[in-house]
Image (cartoon, helix red, strand yellow):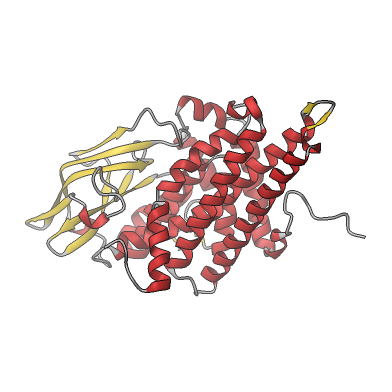
């Protein structure tokens, strides 16, 4: 007779992982438990992050750009990358964002659309964690509608001169290089901008109530002069930045499964140990119903992520699949976090437990890399053929 399903992996989803994928899971989980979990509450409370130290640690275990091929990158499967994101976000969304922005936005942009010279100059150092990158697309007045961006790049002889502002840029204050998207006479172009270039300034965004274990910046480009070869040569138009966002969203739809799992496990452990009226909270019918709901949502989100990951590895992934996963899984994770918070009672608001930290972070994850509303409209267009947001 079987002992019954594992409460931590009820549908035995990890049985679908290959040996290499399990090894990556274990390596990231061990690193996270030893190097991240003991410190994340303090980083969150103080709004700080030891970026250089983390970059070297992440680079040392091969996480940065791990799903890319060559140039010092590990070239793993998409599912392996997703599992790594899951284990990082089980600690904190900000830590997964750190890795995601580096690998799926800045590095991917250079890897997919850059020149050979740009790839050789930046990717090996970024994969090792020696250099950090950021990704400048969102602006103060251009979020869900990137086509309305105001940042401009104009030619001056053989040079480009960039002027504009980017907002909510993860790693912006610590980046060595920024991939900045700007309007040109030819359409939207991407530019590889060393952050030490005159006219480039990164200002820290303060007073955040969410994603506090993450460094966020406003980028100001005041006549930043770049050589002609700073432009990404292989793409013009919004398909460049949108392709990068699709990579980052893929990491999110896996990552939030980790956040949801952490909240469920915290609620389960707490209600099994906390006694009221002479018995554990977990013995009450209402508590068991809540635990059952959390269990279903965590495992359902895991199934969605695994299927989308296998589609990506098979070369059958459509961007609407990613919208489905981002919409469904972030919504599920946020519902799990909110319910788990209430199950911990007053302790649910304490940083001694991870639940409210995850709940607050997931409010940001719901918004960035495409809001819930935009992904819903993308799915609506996919099944009706009618674009409701234009």
Does residue 167 lie above or below 108 as drawn?
Answer: above
- At a point 39% along the width and 51% down the height, the residue shown is 371
Relative image position of residue 274 (x, y in whole percent): 77, 29
Q: Nearer the viewer, residue 281 or 230?
A: 281
- At a point 54% along the width and 74% down the height, the residue shown is 314
Relative image position of residue 215 (x, y in whole percent): 40, 36
Relative image position of residue 348 (x, y in whole percent): 62, 30
Does residue 17 lie above or below 153 as drawn?
Answer: below
- At a point 50% along the width and 75% down the height, the residue shown is 316
Q: Is residue 150 toward the left or the right of residue 54 in the image?
A: left
Q: Nearer the viewer, residue 157 or 6?
A: 6
Relative image position of residue 75 (x, y in whole percent): 52, 63
User: Which quadrant of the figure has residue 205?
Assistant: top left
Any part of residue 359 in sight: yes
- At a point 48% along the width and 58% down the height, the residue shown is 250
Quarter the N terminus occupies: bottom right
Does residue 33 lie above or below 323 as drawn?
Answer: above
Q: How many marks?
A: 0
Any part of residue 114 in sight: no
Quarter the C terminus occupies: bottom left
Q: Nearer the viewer, residue 302 or 221?
A: 302
User: Which quadrant of the figure has residue 235?
Assistant: bottom left
User: Which quadrant of the figure has residue 124?
Assistant: bottom left
Task: In the displayed orientation, state which residue is furthest to the left.
Answer: 157
């Amino acid at each position: 007779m079987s002992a019954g399903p594992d409460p931590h992996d009820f549908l035995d989803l990890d049985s679908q992982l290959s040996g290499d994928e399990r090894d990556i899971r274990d390596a990231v989980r061990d690193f996270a438990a030893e190097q991240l979990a003991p410190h994340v509450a303090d980083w969150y409370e103080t709004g700080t992050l030891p970026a250089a130290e983390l970059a070297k640690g992440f680079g040392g275990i091969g996480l940065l750009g791990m799903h890319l091929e060559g140039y010092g990158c590990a070239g793993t499967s998409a599912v392996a990358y997703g599992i790594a994101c899951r284990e990082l976000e089980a600690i904190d969304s900000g830590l997964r964002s750190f890795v995601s922005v580096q690998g799926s936005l800045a590095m991917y942009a250079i890897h997919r659309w850059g020149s050979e010279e740009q790839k050789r100059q930046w990717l090996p150092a970024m994969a090792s964690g020696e250099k950090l990158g950021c990704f400048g697309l969102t602006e103060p007045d251009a979020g869900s509608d990137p086509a309305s961006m105001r940042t401009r790049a104009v030619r001056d002889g053989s040079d480009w001169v960039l002027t504009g502002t980017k907002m909510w840029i993860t790693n912006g204050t610590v980046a060595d290089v920024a991939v900045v998207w700007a309007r040109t006479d030819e359409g939207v172009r991407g530019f590889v901008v060393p952050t030490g270039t005159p006219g480039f300034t990164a200002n820290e965004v303060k007073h955040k109530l969410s994603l506090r274990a993450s460094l966020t910046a406003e980028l100001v480009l005041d006549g930043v002069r770049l050589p002609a070869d700073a432009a990404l040569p292989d793409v013009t138009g919004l398909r460049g930045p949108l392709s990068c966002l699709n990579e980052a969203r893929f990491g999110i739809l896996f990552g939030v499964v980790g956040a949801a799992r952490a909240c469920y496990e915290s609620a389960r452990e707490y209600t099994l140990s906390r006694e009221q009226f002479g018995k554990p909270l977990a013995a009450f019918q209402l508590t068991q119903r809540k635990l059952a709901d959390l269990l279903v949502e965590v495992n359902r989100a895991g199934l969605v992520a695994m299927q989308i990951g296998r589609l990506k590895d098979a070369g059958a992934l459509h961007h609407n699949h990613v919208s489905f996963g981002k919409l469904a899984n972030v919504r599920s994770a946020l519902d799990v976090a909110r319910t788990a918070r209430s199950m911990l009672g007053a302790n649910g608001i304490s940083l001694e437990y991870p639940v409210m930290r995850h709940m607050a972070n997931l409010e940001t994850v719901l918004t960035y890399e495409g809001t819930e509303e935009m992904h819903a409209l993308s799915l609506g267009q996919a099944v009706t053929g009618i674009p409701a947001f234009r």
